[in-house]
Image: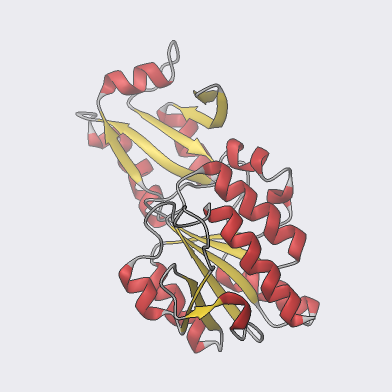
């Protein structure tokens, strides 16, 4: 079953207690669960336990909202949004770099909410030969069918890790020797003047808001893209493409 959003296929929906429970048991990649308010916790207790063990977000909505999402299909108060591809661990992305005999080059996205931006960034990461992408589990778009289409198929080749805490992940990667560079409109250094070689984590902020304060403080360096026109910033996927290819240029 599929959900529609402005005419675009977003993600497969799994409806009903048994189908959702079995999908979780089988390790199917799930972006989030949506549960109707007032649904008896007893019959859903195993589902909730499995979701929490796997750090899958659970959203609570009115039953009428679920009725509209899966019109004509019995949902029994629970549905799951399935991802078109499974997520990986950070270690898996680092392994890709090791297998290629290269310094790790990872792109982290701080609350990107437009699926077309995420898809375009995945396409750029694949084209440039970077090793993978990290996205947050909450307040950001997940891997959906719309993202997959926007990536022009690149989602099949780019490892994507979905983490609970970006700050903790940055600290973990710093301990492993990665240099953390954030894109910020007020960054003190123009990106083409910055040294972007060696093991690198490139952090791109969300549409409109840029990098969060804590994430910005965690960066070892902040770089900016010079803006000579009237618009204050570039689309997140365009900014990511420029920065990713500057890293590749310097590595060559």
Q: Residue at 65% across / 75% down in the picture?
A: 105
Residue nearest the viewer, comparing 140 with 244: 244
Q: Depth check: 179 or 238 in front?
A: 238
**The C terminus sits in image quarter:** bottom right
Q: In this view, does 99 lie above or below 79?
A: below
Image quadrant containing the N terminus: top right
Question: Could you tell me if residue 177 is visible in this image?
Answer: yes
Residue at the spot x=70%, y=83% of the render? 103
Residue at image point 45% right, 35% down: 80
In the rendered image, residue 4, in percent from the top left (x then y), is placed at: 51, 23
Taking the view exactly as shown, the residue that stands out farthest to the front is: 229
**In this rendering, position of residue 219 left or right of residue 12:** left
Pick the front one: 179 or 32? 179
Residue 117 horizontal/vertical position (percent)? 56, 48
**Residue 100: which quarter of the image?**
bottom right
The answer to whether 126 appears left or right of 116 in the picture is right
Please tell me whether residue 96 is drawn above or below residue 50 in the rendered image: below
- Which residue occupies the extreme left position in the image? 38
Estimate the x, y position of residue 39 in percent, counting from the top left.
24, 29
- Kindly indicate the quadrant of the structure image that contains residue 106: bottom right
Which residue is at 38% across, 41% downward? Answer: 47
Note whether residue 28 is visible. Answer: no
């Amino acid at each position: 079953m599929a959900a529609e959003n402005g005419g675009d296929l977003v993600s497969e929906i799994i409806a009903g207690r048994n189908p959702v429970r079995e999908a979780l048991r089988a390790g199917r990649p799930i972006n989030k669960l949506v549960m109707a308010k007032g649904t008896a916790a007893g019959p859903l207790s195993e589902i909730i336990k499995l979701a929490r063990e796997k750090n899958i977000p659970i959203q609570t909505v009115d039953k009428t909202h679920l009725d509209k999402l899966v019109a004509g299909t019995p949902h029994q108060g629970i549905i799951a949004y399935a991802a078109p591809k499974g997520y990986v661990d950070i270690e898996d992305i680092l392994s890709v770099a090791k297998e290629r005999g290269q310094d790790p080059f990872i792109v982290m996205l701080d609350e990107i909410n437009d699926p077309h931006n995420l898809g375009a960034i995945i396409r750029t990461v694949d084209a440039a030969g970077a090793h993978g992408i990290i996205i947050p589990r909450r307040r950001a778009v997940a891997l959906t069918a719309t993202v997959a289409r926007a990536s022009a198929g690149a989602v099949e080749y780019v490892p994507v890790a979905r983490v609970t805490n970006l700050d903790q992940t940055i600290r973990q990667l710093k301990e492993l020797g990665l240099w953390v560079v954030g894109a910020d409109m007020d960054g003190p250094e123009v990106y083409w003047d910055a040294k972007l070689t060696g093991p690198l984590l490139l952090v791109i902020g969300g549409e409109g808001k840029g990098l969060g304060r804590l994430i910005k403080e965690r960066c070892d360096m902040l770089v900016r893209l010079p803006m000579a026109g009237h618009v204050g910033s570039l689309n997140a996927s365009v900014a990511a493409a420029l920065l990713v290819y500057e890293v590749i240029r310097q590595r060559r």
